[in-house]
Image (cartoon, helix red, strand yellow):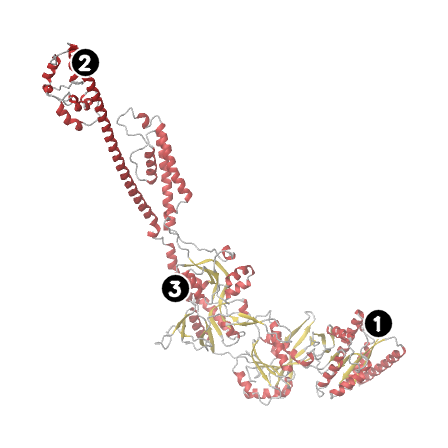
Amino acid sequence: MLALYTKYIYTFATYLLLLVTGVSCANDASDDIYTIGGVLADNDSENHFRQTISLLNFRNNYKSSRNMTYYGKTIRMDKNPIKTVFNVCDKLIDQRVYAVVVSHTSTSGDLSPAAVSYTSGFFQIPVIGISSRDAAFSDKNIHVSFLRTVPPYYHQADVWLEMLNHFGYTKVIIIHSSDTDGRAILGRFQTTSQTYYDDIDVKATVEMIVEFEPKLESFAEHLIDMKTAQSRVYLVYASTEDAQVIFRDAATYNMTEAGHVWIVTEQALNATNIPDGVLGLQLEHVNNDTIHLMDTVYVLASAIREMMQNETITEPPKNCDDSGVNWESGKRLFHYLKTRNITGETGQVAFDDNGDRIYAGYDVINMRPKQKRHVVGKFYYDTNKATMRLKIDDSQIIWPGRQKKKPEGIMIPTHLKVLTIEEKPFVYVRRLTDDEVNCMDDEVPCPLFNNTNGVENDYCCRGYCIDLLKALSQRINFTFELGLSPDGQFGHYILRNSSTGTLPSTPPKKEWTGLIGELVNERADMIVAPLTINPERAEYIEFSKPFKYQGITILEKKPSRSSTLVSFLQPFSNTLWILVVVSVHVVALVLYLLDRFSPFGRFKLSHVDSHEEKALNLSSAIWFAWGVLLNSGIGEGTPRSFSARVLGMVWAGFAMIIVASYTANLAAFLVLERPKTKLSGINDARLRNTMENLTCATVKGSSVDMYFRRQVELSNMYRTMEANNYDTAEKAIEDVKKGKLMAFIWDSSRLEYEASKDCELVTAGELFGRSGYGIGLQKGSPWTDAVTLTILEFHESGFMEALDKAWIFHGNAQQCEQFEKTPNTLGLKNMAGVFILVAAGVAIGVGLIIIEVIYKRHQVKKQKRMDIARHAAAKWRGTIEKRKTIRTSLAMQRQYNVGLNANPGTISYTVDKRRFHRLGVPRAPENAWIGDNDMLRNRRFLDPSLKPKHSPKVHAPLLGRLRTPGNIMPPKYSPGYTSDVSHLVV
């Protein structure tokens, strides 16, 4: 009774206020009057609208001046949209309304509010709806000036995402109608999820989308497809009638029992056969038009007041007859309305760019038996953080099947599609021969996955990852079907632009290829391969904990040993060799000079001791210096002087040090020489400097390729190596072995395996880009936790270490290490220069002996010619002298005979004839004395006072013939003048 009395008093005061306002407006024409129109559903709404407008005039904080007055004009909403249009023109626009507030009942439909929006929007008059929630009103190309204080139905997708995050569901099935609102809620869910999960590790993905035509008759066909999916979480947008058909058929297939989760929108929540345990949403104050009208009026007054303070508002159009009228102030007023953010009776009131209400609150409803609704949570605006928050009391929820425990939301399959890729030593792939039917005991069949090109796909796989997959399947109880990547690629993403036509541009979408693409597109359940964990992949798939930690390194071929023909010269530099050779000759020269000019040298003492050796000449000094240096023994020609011998001892010490140093360094260069890597690591300047002729590469689209894309400091290096990248790691490693590729950058596990298998390969530098190999799974896979825990157990038990020893190291690493420590065996290649040096010495010696023989023969011939010439000259000289002597003797004989008339038989002649009985033999004048020519030639030899110049062997025959028994020499002069001398003596 008191409440009714209070209502009457309030109504009376309102009418009195309206009367006073009307009189005041009539009396004062200069007041600023702002008329607000209303197209409302019933009398209560009209009365409350007018009361709110009247009370607004007493709120100075919503008025820019005291003369400012608000006036309300209302009409009734008609079910006929055409009548509604005429009423708006004749009764509202004719009153110069600044804005129109519109509401409708459920029976009038959305056509009448749309008619009001079309009509007012044509003249740029803002329209504010308080009950229209269809997605069509968000299209600003049609409803150019429409706002609403209630959110559209498709905004419930935002609450869906919050609920999925709260419950931890990662895989869902969306069921929606094919009308505008159904497709809008799907689009809202997909676009919002892309930005909503930026900072969340676990992201909900849509496993299946079920779209149906409105006014369903049966939903059984769709339910059959849904039962094959893994997800058991269903998000439903449907009208009340369609929801009843869905729930009816779902109950037939037992899909409303325990283990299933149903989350529905407001319309589906009103179905009469809704199952127990369903969660639904209900907009707060959805049926209370009174407070929505109040919030609408205050939002409008706030926008008009701010606009009046900033700019001038022109009058709105007066009628609908002038189609050319374009109210610019209406456009500006609509802009001010969209920027409102006030706290009203319905909560925080704000709008997005489409004029739709944001920050609207929802109740989370849990359906109980007998269609009872129980509020278990709220979606509300947090004023402290200025954002929406979800609060749910899980203990109050009763799930389908009257379960208190939250369902898993997913059906865990026990038979998985597993993909792998050939990557030694983790996966070895072998094709079956024609004679083979089945794989070997340690192998698993692995046909090409999704192979449609007709290529034979009978393959068998074994290796590190295959053993790991077997152990996982046994430990966590699942079966698998192994498939091999047909293109041999792990997969990389391709940016594709999804914007088309008039739709607003959206960011490019990443589409994955290879194994990652198969997992992202849910055509496979798991990837067991050396799959590197990186941020790009983790955004779209889930990874287990690493089963092997590794990094990135560089593989290269060991440099060939520098065994040239002059390898024996490597211990010393060229400069040192030149200095040694120069020192030999300088010391030899100094030794010669010291021994030459020393008072105690052989040159000074040679006249004292006739048995002393020859003096030290320059040739002997050089031979002595080389002999000491090469330790070849010293023969003739050693220094005699003390100063030279001191230098010789110093030179011997120098030679000992040089020889010892050479021997030690020769062992280091030729025996213990181990080749080093060409590169020091990723920071090597030759890798960073693209001008040098150094080719490096990796595998296209691999995790290493993605790593180089991320690293800004490696951008120059990546641009150079991008053109050299290979399709597979096997081809790149083969080119490194052949020397075609100098550096291959890849995962350290694979490269260390290759280096341990082939000792000619080596990894360079330290690891960089450290990461790990993980097992890839779908987003939200129920196997993720089980696989991760099992791998951790394998690490603790030593199983992973056993796999490393069995497949990666093979014991070859120790063999290569032993090979590195073992000294090298010198071969012909190392010492070929020494043999060539000896051969050159032999050749030079033979050449020199040939030259010596030729030269000696030439000297002998020259000497013979000289001897013959000298003999001929001596004979000719003797002949000339004889002739001169004979002529002189004959002349003197004639003078004697003429002058004295002496008898030839003189004493001298008689004596001579007795002594030389052959004088009586008649002789020629030139042979006046027997054997005179021979006697003259050998007179010097017969004279004992003269030293003979020729050997006695030459003159022995002559002596036997000329010497008489009494050793009487013939006279020095011929008998022609001895007789004259005898007469003179007598």
Q: Secondary structure at mark 1?
A: loop
| Residue carrying label 1 | 65
Of marks 1 and 3, which one's residue comes earlier in the chain?
1
Q: Position of residue 15 (x, y in %)?
A: 84, 82
| Residue carrying label 3 | 810
Q: Position of residue 649 (x, y in %)?
A: 35, 34
Q: Is residue 370 above or below residue 524?
A: below
The structure residue drawn at horizontal position 82% and vertical position 84%, both measured from the top left corner, is 8
Corner quadrant of residue 443: bottom left
Which amino acid type is marked by label 3? His
Q: Secondary structure at mark 3?
A: loop
Which amino acid type is marked by label 1? Ser
Q: Are marks 1 and 3 in contact (CB under 8 Å)?
A: no
| Residue carrying label 2 | 895
Instruction: Look at discs 2 and 3 and give the one toward the viewer.
Output: 2
Q: Residues within 10 Å of mark 2 (few under 14, many from 20)?
A: few
The answer to whether residue 148 shows anywhere in this view is: no
The structure residue drawn at horizontal position 30% and vertical position 45%, both measured from the top left corner, is 843
Of marks 2 and 1, which one's residue comes earlier in the chain?
1
Marks 2/3: CA distance?
A: 131 Å
